[in-house]
Amino acid sequence: MRFLETYDLDFLKVMNDHLYPRGQVDVLRSVEDLRKIRPLPGDAGGFSGQLEVLRGLRQRLGPDVLMCTTLFNAWTVLRRFTASPSDKHGPPRLDGMDERDDALTRLLKEDRAAFKAALDAVSDTLAAFAAACLEAGADGIFLSVRDDWVDRPENGAGVYAEMVRPTDLKILKAVANGKFNVLHVCGRPNDLKAFNDYPVQVINWADRAAGPAIADVRDWLKPVIAGGVDNLNTLPKGTPEDCANEVRDALRQAGNRPIIIAAGCTFDPDAVPAENLRAVVAAARNA
């Protein structure tokens, strides 16, 4: 709330610091662990805490400020399951994979059916949670997806389209009545066009740090564009004028397309000077 009020922002994007409930699987190591993953209620475990956060925020915000809440898609949840639980969150790495991706590749090769069943179970849970978020006062969800973790040579071709896209769409179907659903395509998108028909109002990606550029997609991208500011470099390391210039450039690139000026992805609030954030807001308001 202090962040929203300090910078006079147009909407509130809420992080989810309440981890997905792991149930009977502490760390995902084997096909047997995959088979233990079952659908859970939308208020299971820590999810109930996030719903309380949303209820409290809606009371504070009133009816006029749009609010979306973060969900990571089913593949990302399984990826996190391959390591011990952690509530650490920060700007993602854009370069390469790590041992969690290798673990998922191994499990996918060992038992594709069990892997798909686990993805389906997680997405059932996430769909229930997403619907509960709207009931708690959110206007939509901020669904984070990442295809470069999935469609890597080690996994074979077309895994995202075959196994992950249906689970993404299941989650979005659960919030079809939401008026502010945002799709965040994290990392370096392999194919941004593959997400063009997702039923969301807004799409956000790291146009500066990862691409593609706004100008390259504005003529065919259907949802409202959100982006324009480099979360990894310009925001934490640039000057206020650097930040303002990126805003003005993003508006030029968008042309007549609707655009929300936003960071391309997560930024570290302890590393970003307040004057840089004020410069972003001022440049957008004065455009």
Image: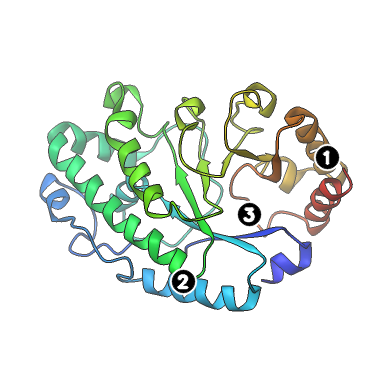
Write the residue at 75% across / 28% down.
253
At x 36%, y 27%, the residue is 151
In the rendered image, the quadrant that contains the C terminus is top right
Mark 1 or mark 2: which comes first in sequence? 2
Q: Secondary structure at mark 1?
A: helix
- Residue 230 in picture, x, y percent from top left: 69, 40
Q: Amino acid at mark 3?
A: Asp
Residue 19 appears anywhere in the view: no
In the depicted view, which residue is nearer to us: 277 or 102?
A: 277
Residue at the spot x=22%, y=58% of the render? 39
Q: Amino acid at mark 2?
A: Ala
Q: Which percent across, then down, holds residue 176?
A: 43, 51
First in sequence: mark 1 or mark 3?
1
**Quarter location, residue 59:** bottom right
Question: Where does label 2 land, which residue?
Answer: 136
Q: Which residue is mark 3?
A: 268
Calculate the distance from the C-alpha at mark 1 to the C-alpha at mark 3.
18 Å
> Does the rendering let one see residue 242?
yes
Q: Is residue 201 left or right of residue 21?
A: right
* Image location (x, y in percent) of residue 35: 12, 50
Q: Which mark is residue 242?
A: 1
Mark 1 vs mark 2, CA separation in Å: 39 Å
**Mark 2 residue crowding within 10 angstroms, few (<14) / some (14–19) / many (20+):** some
